[in-house]
Image (cartoon, rainbow, N blue to C red):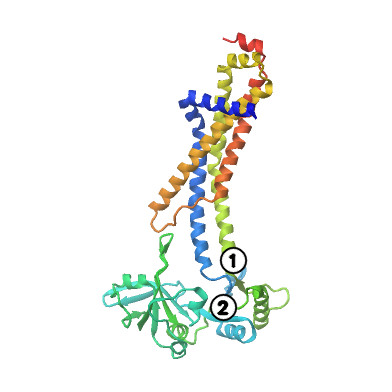
Amino acid sequence: MFALLESIRSALESIRAHGFRSLLTSLGIIIGVMSVIAVVSIVQGLSYTINAQFSGLGGNSLTVRSYTPFKKQLQGRFAKLRDSDMQLIARQIDGISHITPIIYTQSGRRGAISYRSQSSFSQVIGIGPSYLDVNGVYPEQGRFFTADDDARRRLVCAVGVDVLENLEMPDDSIGEFFRIGNEWCKVVGVIERRGELLGFPQDDYVLLPYGTAKRIMGASRDLDIQIQLLVDDMNRQDEVKERIRRVLRQEHGLKSGDPDDFKVQTPEQLTASFNTVINTITAVSAGIVGISLLVGGIGIMNIMLVSVTERTREIGILKALGATRQNILMQFLIEAMTLCMIGGLVGVALGYGLGALVAAMLPGFPEAHVPLWAVTLSFGFCAAVGIIFGIVPAAKAAQLDPIDALRYE
């Protein structure tokens, strides 16, 4: 233990004595770690924010949507979910509540809206009265529409706050009318603000009763809907999913071996799919910028080899005083590792600062987030670089003959 502490003290003293050279030596490590942490902090900040959005759906919610394999899309054959599918699920599946349809009134999911002389485009979505319970969003002003509004297909709506700003409507817009396409719609509620994500507003939408949305689109059209529902018992979620799958396969006339033309997904599955993409991006990006760590390691090895040559007489004196090969090996190896670890520490701090700066400069981008695993991995990699690239100079120093070393000029 004494030898280890003395080696660390000697390493720090050597780094301090050659401060500028030590800075240049560890610069590659600093840049490498800084780049990795900056990339990871930006990507993981995005992941953290979007995961929080998914968690708002509730762990006991299920989403059923149509799914068409790419091959069938090329053939012009598209799967659809219809009202009959939702009614069948509500009628035959026990243990579910707050089932709601969702339909987008335009194929591009953006519709023209106007108020007096102002006009804009917004998401116009038809939903059932249970939509709020399933998604955990509630009116900030006014009310949400009722089952009677849906059944009578009344032209009432609840809007996001961005709709009021885009159309320059009054702050208290409850009871105001604005145009959706060719229809006039009365505002009965304003939904609570959710902010922006990646610069895209999450409050620019108009919610209509499902029956009203179908009326606007034309009752005779063959519409594709999504279905959202809540499972009463979380422990039965997988059972409910499987029962929905069997019921829909039978309803759609799918034979054994035919793939499903729909998907039943939980928020966890949506999150997992997103995280798979994010983790792949993180790994590829970190791998690319991590190449600079190898370059920094090579630089450390070169400088340490030079240091061994410069300190040949010092090594000879140490051996003459009784230092063993293991003592010399440990001293130079710890010096290389210390350089890497100091570079890693500075790189982590600068990387987080750079990530936070980039995130702050991008409008609507989530805050940078550095997970603990990224910091741990960075320091672990720095230690590995110090060992791998420090072992050759350390071994060279340990193998010097003390007599030759003392004679070295």
Q: Kindly identify which residue carries mark 2.
A: 229
- Indicate whether 129 appears above or below 366: below
- Residue pushed farthest right? 256
* Nearest the eye: 18 or 53: 18
- Residue pushed farthest left? 117
Residue 404 location, quadrant: top right
Residue 259 location, quadrant: bottom right
Percent x, y of residue 171: 29, 74
Q: Which of the marked residues, 1 or 2, is nearer the chain's N terminus?
A: 2
Q: Amino acid at mark 2?
A: Leu
Q: Kindly identify which residue carries mark 1.
A: 268
Q: Give the mark count.
A: 2
* Nearest the eye: 67 or 404: 404
Percent x, y of residue 403: 66, 10
* Crowd around label 1: few <14 · some 14–19 · many ≥20 (10 Å): some
Element class at badge 1: helix
Q: Is residue 346 visible?
A: yes
Q: Amino acid at mark 1?
A: Glu
